[in-house]
Image (cartoon, rainbow, N blue to C red):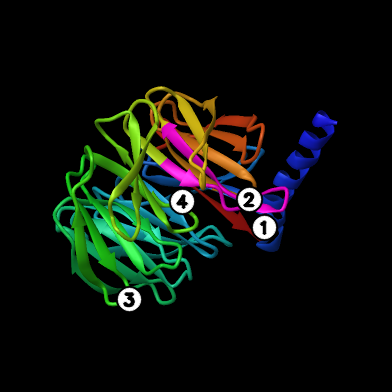
């Protein structure tokens, strides 16, 4: 009976993300930044077939994908490229940035927020018309961004080894606070419910969880060799109760650690290619990109998290975002 129950649970867990993908068109595609080739590579999932290679301004490092638009940040080229997810074609290239690094999308899909670390700015781009609508000084070194589920708050790490985190209220587009992290902060993300902010480090083998309201640390989790990056699964079911998973990469170890997002309980570790620093999840898949091996590794986003495919796509695959094509 235990085996039967586990199989039924697995079917339920797998059904939800697949249905989500079907509602959006049903074809998951990984968008991978190949910085040494100045390309964005679109890879069909789970087959690993390369669909398209789009030329990008110099040094495309990071990518974020929404329902209709992907945002690619080219650091050395000082540019941000908007890509139509459905057609896999370039919509617009915005130039004039000093050293742009990370993009985050508002939950309603209206805005992209991009950090320009050389100028210490948070740049807001209106996605409907592809125009810059606001520039806000948040602190030199502005880098990784966490956006709350309601889109009303941003936490921005000032540097890859940040000793300060800036808090921005997006309803008024103003800085409302600063946090001194426990260690050199690297990546950060709000939990799906918005109650916690998970902060990884560049100098510690741990994750620090902060209360989103008080901005105080409340818990520490073991996370492997730094630096770590993290993403959360969209949605899963455990019986009748909503459940989310947190996926934490440790690129130098070649490990992906999985936690329950709500209880913070550790579940298991999965081996991924060496150098897999960044990850993305959508459409029932978790995908990691290896900067050091140039590979894309695909896993099921639910138990038992088996690796489905590993594909070599470029000499260096820095970042990945999963989108869904019609």
Q: Residue at x 54, y 60 (%)?
A: 85
Secondary element under disc 3, as helix, strand or loop, is loop
Region in magenta: 230-249
Q: Toward which corner of the image does residue 64 lie, by quadrant?
A: bottom left
Q: Position of residue 180 (x, y in %)?
A: 18, 48
Judge left or right: residue 94 versus residue 191: left
Q: Residue at x 80, y 36 (%)?
A: 5
Q: Which residue is mark 4?
A: 54
The earlier-in-sequence mark between 2 and 4 is: 4
State the separation of the CA atoms marked 4 and 1. 27 Å
Is the residue 98 above or below the residue 133 in the image? above
In which quadrant is the N terminus drawn?
top right
Answer yes or no: do the residues labelled 3 and 2 have beta carbons within 8 Å? no
Q: Which residue is mark 3?
A: 171
Q: Which residue is mark 2?
A: 283
Q: Toward which corner of the image does residue 303 lie, by quadrant?
A: top right
Task: Give the class, few, some or many, for how many residues have Cα within 10 Å of label 2's Cα (few <14, many ≥20).
Answer: many
Query: Of the residues tagged 3 and 4, which is closer to the observer?
Result: 3
Is the residue 75 above or below the residue 108 in the image? above
State the separation of the CA atoms marked 3 and 4. 34 Å
Q: Which residue is mark 1?
A: 20
Answer yes or no: do the residues labelled 1 and 2 have beta carbons within 8 Å? yes
């Amino acid at each position: 009976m235990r085996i039967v129950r586990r199989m039924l649970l697995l079917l339920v867990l797998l059904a939800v993300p697949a249905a989500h993908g079907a509602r959006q068109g049903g074809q998951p595609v990984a968008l991978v930044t190949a910085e040494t080739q100045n390309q964005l590579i679109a890879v069909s999932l789970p087959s690993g077939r390369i669909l398209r290679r789009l030329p990008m301004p110099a040094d495309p490092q990071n990518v974020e994908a929404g329902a209709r638009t992907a945002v690619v940040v080219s650091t050395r080229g000082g540019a941000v490229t908007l890509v139509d997810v459905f057609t896999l074609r370039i919509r617009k290239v915005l130039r004039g940035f000093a050293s742009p690094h990370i993009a985050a999308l508002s939950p309603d899909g209206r805005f992209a927020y991009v950090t320009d670390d050389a100028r210490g700015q948070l740049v807001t781009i209106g996605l409907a018309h592809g125009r810059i609508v606001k520039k806000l000084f948040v602190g030199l070194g502005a880098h990784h961004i966490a956006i709350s589920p309601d889109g009303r708050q941003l936490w921005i790490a000032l540097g890859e080894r940040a000793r300060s985190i800036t808090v921005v209220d997006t309803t008024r587009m103003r800085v409302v606070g600063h946090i001194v992290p426990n260690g050199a902060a690297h990546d950060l993300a709000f939990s799906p419910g918005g109650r916690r902010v998970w902060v990884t480090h560049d100098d510690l083998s741990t994750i620090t969880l902060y209360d989103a309201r008080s901005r105080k640390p409340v818990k520490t989790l073991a996370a492997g060799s730094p630096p770590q990056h993290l993403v959360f699964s969209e949605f899963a079911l455990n019986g009748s109760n909503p459940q989310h998973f947190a996926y934490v990469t440790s690129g130098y170890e070649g490990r992906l650690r999985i936690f329950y997002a709500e209880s913070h309980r550790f579940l298991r570790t999965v081996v991924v290619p060496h150098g897999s620093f960044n990850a993305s999840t959508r459409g029932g898949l978790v995908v990691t990109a290896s900067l050091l091996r140039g590979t894309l590794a695909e896993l099921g986003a639910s138990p038992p998290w088996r690796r489905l495919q590993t594909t070599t796509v470029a000499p260096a695959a820095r970042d990945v975002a999963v989108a869904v094509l019609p």
